[in-house]
Image: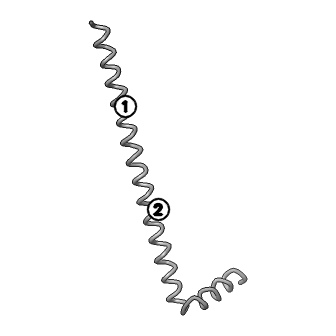
Amino acid sequence: MKTTKTIEQSKNRAETQTDVNAEISKVSVTAIAISAGIIGIWATASLFAGLISSGGPAGLINNLITAIIG
């Protein structure tokens, strides 16, 4: 009887540990997804700001080539 009780306690601990690891993984994936979304929004905003400040797509490409060549 005592052995069965110990096995059940070990089993419960293993299940709890698995649940904690699963929750940590979910939080990590969510944090990475949010970070990727913020970076994407920032990149899009920067592209539009560059388009506006250079006078359009042709001006943006011209300024890019000038920046690369020197």
In the rendered structure, are the residues bearing label 1 and label 2 in contact, judged by CB atoms less than 8 Å apart?
A: no
Q: Secondary structure at mark 1?
A: helix
Q: How far across and how far down the image is residue 30, in percent?
A: 40, 53
Q: At 50% across and 73% down in the image, what residue appears?
A: 43
Q: Camera-side residue: 50 or 15?
A: 15
Are there few (<14), some (14-19), or many (20+) residues within 10 Å of tag 1? few
Residue 2: mark in rendering:
none
Amino acid type at mark 2: Ala
Q: At 45% across and 55% down in the image, what residue appears?
A: 32
The residue labelled by disc 2 is 36
Q: Secondary structure at mark 2?
A: helix
Q: Is residue 57 above or below residue 31?
A: below
Q: Residue furthest bottom?
A: 55
Q: How far across and how far down the image is residue 61, in percent?
A: 63, 86
Total residue callouts: 2
Are there few (<14), some (14-19), or many (20+) residues within 10 Å of tag 2? few
Q: Residue furthest right?
A: 69
Q: How far across and how far down the image is residue 59, in percent?
A: 60, 91
Horizontal side of 31 relative to 56 (left or right) equals left
The residue labelled by disc 1 is 17
Q: Earlier in the sequence, mark 1 or mark 2?
A: 1
